Amino acid sequence: MTSAGKNTTASADYQAAAPAELPRYLQSPPWEWTREPVVMAARTAERPGFLAWQPGEKERASKLPVKLLWDGEGDRDEFIAAGLAYDHARDGGYHAAYLVAGAEATVRPYLERGRAWGTADEFLRILARFDSAAVDFVLRSDRGYSGVTAALLPVGGSEVTRRMAELLAGPYDLRWDSTCRRWFERHIDSAAPDLVAAALSAPQSDRSAVGIPGRGKPRGEVATSALDRGTAEVALRRLAEQGLRAALLAAAEPYGPEGVAAIAAAADPLLELPDKIPALPDWLTPNRLPPIILRDSGNRLPVEAVTVFCTMLAMSGPAHTYAGVREIAALGTPESLADFVFELFET
């Protein structure tokens, strides 16, 4: 009996599963896979920024709070005009609240030049006020000030796709993850062609651009003029896990069966690997742990497969569970998995 009150049966009481019974990722772990990159010319054009408000969203955005640093003395419009002129002469970066609160004749010319800094609410107010005329201004501001990112939910286009893919593909960061996933949920039909084109572009020489096992660029780094292949592949995998796989494969159809197959392979969540595969600690001996019994055959996972599973567990953490762990959890019986995990915890 284990401390949990369950019977723990020795591995010798069960026959080891034959290789044919095991999925590919247990016969050969994903971090040992190799694949030749499929390179195909892009079949989508660069899409300019556009607005796609959801019902009632624009009206709500137009009422968001804005903090104007004005003490109430003198004429407010003169204060705003002077502030804009000062900011423009200094570095071309304006306080976003000026463009929300100032007279239209005063502030509209500034949409054509420079950028702003401020809160997401303030940038949403700018978009609600000037609509499509403010899209390029907000995108310029986003390149220079990461606080704008949360205001991009209603904004689509190739540049926003690159920005969101860069953020999504970086190391997990709570500040960005929800925003990026919500954005792709809204814009996947227009964004997927850009991701597919980048994932089929020529790979870069660095490891992170190939996608096995690179993770893309660090979060918070401003998107470049082109989305690299490695970043696109990481974004594909994370979006596929989010339930958007069908939309990604549909966007690959113009590239024919080879393109669809390449995107399906690139989007495999089993390729969501850390930069360095962790080594198992010396104190962990997989063949001494309770056996994991397969639901279908009643056979146990062989020791080699258990070692792979332990490595997958080591690759998981509070923010992300490696996809292979969920796959194996579906293969084993609940009772044997409970015994295995409890004994592993007690080891």
Image (cartoon, rainbow, N blue to C red):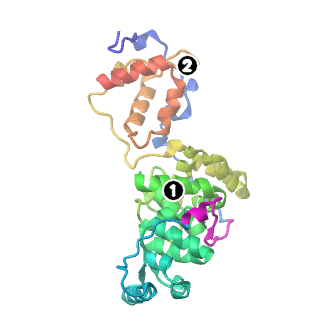
Name the image quarter holding the C terminus: top left
Where residue 33 sits: x, y (%)? 50, 43
Task: Give, as a single range, the part of the protein colored magenta.
Answer: 43-61
What's the CA distance linking mark 1 and mark 2?
37 Å
Dot 1 or dot 2: first in sequence order is: 1
- The residue at the point 43 percent across, 42 percent down is 320
Per the image, the residue denoted by label 2 is 295
Q: Which mark is residue 180?
A: 1
Q: State the residue at coordinates (68%, 66%).
A: 44
Compare residues 207 and 45 and report the one nearer the observer. Answer: 45
Coordinates of residue 291 in the picture (x, y in percent): 43, 18
Would you say 97 lies left or right of 201 here?
A: left
Q: Secondary structure at mark 1?
A: helix
Amino acid on which the number 1 mark rests in the picture: Cys
| Labels 1 and 2 touching (C-beta < 8 A) | no
Q: The residue tagged with tag 2: helix, strand or loop?
A: loop
Label 2, residues with CA under 10 Å away: few <14, some 14-19, many ≥20: some
Vertical relation: 205 (above or below) 177: below
User: Quick check: is 48 in the magenta stretch?
Assistant: yes
